[in-house]
Image (cartoon, rainbow, N blue to C red):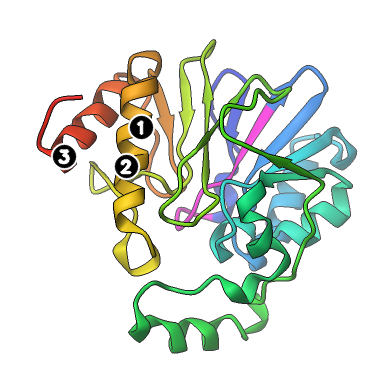
Amino acid sequence: MKQVTAGLWEIDEIGSAVHCYLWEWREGYTLIDTGFPKDARTVLDTLVANKIPLHAVRRIIVTHGDLDHTGGLAQIRRATQARVVCHAVEKEFLEHPMRRRPAKWLLRVPFRLATLLPGLYQRPVTPDELVVDGQELPEGFTVVHTPGHTPGHISLVHRERRLLIAGDAISNRGGKLRAPSNGFTPDVDNAQRSIWRLAKRYGDEIEMVVFGHGPPILSNGGKRVKGLASQIFSAEI
C-alpha cells in the first residue's frame, strides 16, 4: 500500500489500471472501490500483510458500478462483512451488473464477451446503505452526486482535509485532467456538468485530488479542476 496523505492509502498492489483506496477513521477503515474481480484476493492479502484485520474494514463506498470499480466487491464484502454504500440510483447496477453497458454500440459485444471470462465475471451485490447528494458520511466525506459516466456516480469531498476522491468523474491521464471516456459514458453532457459542479462548488476547498484512473494531484488540485471546467465550457468558473 502507498500512503497518499494522512489517513488515505492507495492499494497499489492491484496495479495501475484502476485505483482503489483505503481510508482510516475513528471507527476503523473504509474501502473506496474494489478493483476488478481478479483484484479481490490481492486487496484482501494486502490488508492482512499490512496488519489490518479484515473485520476492521467497516464500510465499502462504491463510486459507481463499473466492472473495474466493483468487480471485487462481492468477495471483499463476504470476507470483511463490511457495509456497502452507494448512491440510490446506482443500486441497480450493483444488483444487476449486466445492465451496465458501454455507451458505444461497437463496444457492447466485445465488452459482454469479456465479462464472461472467470477473472472478469462480476457478482451482484445488494448495497446496505443508499446515499444522496450532499449527505455527510461518518468518515467525514460529503457525497457529491456526479452523474454522466453512470447515473448514480458519486465523488467524495473531505473539506477538513481539502481532499476530493473523484472516482471516474475526472481522470488524470498523460499529465492532463480529462472528462470520462465517451465510449463508456452514456450521458456526456451530464458528465461535463458534473465537472462544472465540482469546480464551482468545491474548487476553492480542494487541494488534493485522487482518481480512479491516473496519479493523484497533491497540490493545487482545485485549481486544476476549475481549469478543466473552464476548458470544457470555454468560460471561467
Q: Which mark is residue 233?
A: 3
Q: Are marks 2 and 1 in contact (CB under 8 Å)?
A: yes
Q: Residue at x 58, y 18 (%)?
A: 6
Of the pair 137 and 78, the residue shown nearer to us: 137
- Check disc 2 and report the residue beneath it: 193
Who's the residue at 36% across and 44% down the image?
170
Q: Quadrant of the N terminus?
A: top right
Q: Position of residue 79 (x, y in %)?
A: 87, 53
Q: Which one is nearer the viewer's eye here, 159 or 11?
A: 159
Q: How many numbered circles are shown? A: 3
Residue 224 forms part of the magenta stretch: no
Q: CA distance from mark 3 to mark 1?
A: 12 Å
The mark that comes first in sequence, 3 or 1, is 1
- In the rendered structure, which amino acid carries the disc numbered 2? Arg
Provide the residue designation for mark 1.
197
Q: Nearer the viewer, residue 105 or 207?
A: 105
Up the image or down, 194 lies above or below 149; here it is: above
98, above or below 131, in the image: below
| Label 3 secondary element | helix
The residue closer to the viewer here, 228 or 18, is 228
Q: Residue at x 65, y 23 (%)?
A: 136
Residue 19 sits inside the magenta stretch: yes
Q: Is residue 108 left or right of residue 51?
A: left
Q: Position of residue 92 (x, y in %)?
A: 67, 62
Query: Looking at the magenta stretch, what is its main secondary structure?
Result: loop
Residue 188 x/y as whole percent: 31, 57
How busy is the neighbourhood of tag 2: few (under 14 within 10 Å), some, or many (20 plus)? some
- Asked where in the image residue 40 lies, by quadrant, the reply is bottom right
Residue extent of the magenta highlight: 15-23
- Taking 122 as reference, is 214 left or right? left
Q: CA distance from mark 2 to mark 1?
A: 6 Å
Identity of the amino acid at label 3? Phe
